[in-house]
Amino acid sequence: MLPESSTIQTQLDDDGVLVLTLNRPERKNAFNDEQWDTTADTLRQANEDPRVAVVVLTGSGGNFSSGVDLSSFQANPEPRSDGFESAFHAFVPALFAFEKPLIAAVQGVAIGGGATIPMACDFVYAGESLRMRLPFANLGLVPEIGSSYTLQAAIGRQRAAELMLSAEWIDAARALEMGLVARVLPDEQLHAETLSKAREIAQWPISALRAIKQTLRTADQAGIEAAIRVENEAMGRLAGSPENIEAVTAFMQKRKPDFKQFRTKGRT
């Protein structure tokens, strides 16, 4: 039986398509420890389950995901060595180790991890309401989930640098133009069209689907692994820094962060 919790819903149909739905609509599907853990467990089990040919990853309530739930850091914004870190670091290898087709269906907000997770999928269908953002610079952090590599691979270094360094918003039309998504659909058609494509793929031998995915990913594997290693090292330095604490505090207080206060001699 595939894992399920209050924050993750799974549905496997007779065609071999597993729909994995992020289900914290009241938080715009922001990830907490339970969600990282359950999503990782689901991907690991689906990888070995002979009934599953394709996985569709989506979100409930009209949004994909607003990334990490920053409200969990409100009480203690200092560096953490608790379940969050271990849950997140268990999720990332499970995502990249998944050997079957993985399709993201995204609409509404896709921020931070909610934007970088789709970049690790095989392709992405988007609803017209999609608004993506990579807010790592704004949070005093660095990209994660291998996105410092996957974003460049998708859209090129200059465009990737522009999006990462500016933390600007990206709408569905621009995401399509840049190559971040394969198709843009009306929101009301997104689920049905994604399932239709997933079922079209699921009719083929799983052994062939695995092999095709492996051939597409082999050239990228070393780059992804190197990116994750560098990202994790940099995140360890920056998470809990004064700038990061200011960013999270400002977010919770609904104000603009003041980073200029940290621009003193000898500190960069």
Image (cartoon, rainbow, N blue to C red):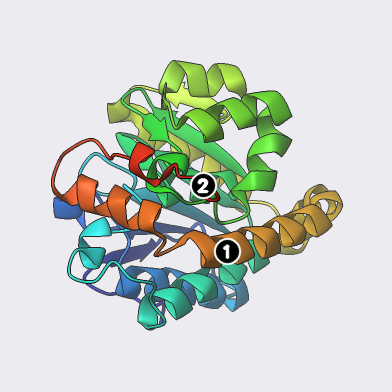
Q: Is residue 100 left or right of residue 12?
A: right
Q: Nearer the viewer, residue 231 or 105?
A: 231
Q: Nearer the viewer, residue 226 or 23?
A: 226
Number of marks in the rendered image: 2
The crowding category of the residue bearing disc 2, from other C-alpha atoms within 10 Å (few below 14, some 14 to 19, many at least 20), is many
> Taking the image as drawn, is residue 30 in sight?
yes
Q: Secondary structure at mark 2?
A: helix
Q: Amino acid at mark 1?
A: Leu
> Looking at the figure, which quarter contains the N terminus?
bottom left
| Residue plotted at (55% across, 50% down) | 266
Using residue 93 as the reference point, say whether residue 60 is left or right of it. Answer: left
- Rounded to the nearest angstrom, the CA distance separating label 2 from label 1 is 11 Å
Q: Quadrant of residue 77?
A: bottom left
- Tell me the tag on residue 206: none
Picture coordinates of residue 200, whole percent (x, y): 58, 42
Image coordinates of residue 37 in percent, x first then y, are 40, 76
User: What residue is rendered at 45% in x and 45% in y?
Assistant: 264
Residue 179: name its quadrant.
top right
What residue is pinned by disc 2?
A: 116
Q: Which of pointers 2 and 1 lies earlier in the amino acid sequence?
A: 1
Amino acid of disc 2: Thr
**Residue at 52% in and 78% down:** 45
Helix, strand or loop under label 1: helix
Residue under the point 42% across and 22% down:
172
- Return the x and y of residue 80 as percentages of the image width and height: 38, 76
Mark 2 and mark 1 in contact? Answer it, CB < 8 Å. no
Residue placed most toward the observer, 128 or 246: 246
Number of residues whose C-alpha sits closer than 10 Å to that of mark 1, classed few (under 14), some (14–19) or many (20 or more) = some
Residue that carries the numbered disc 1 in the rendered image: 95
Is residue 7 found left or right of 262 in the rendered image? left
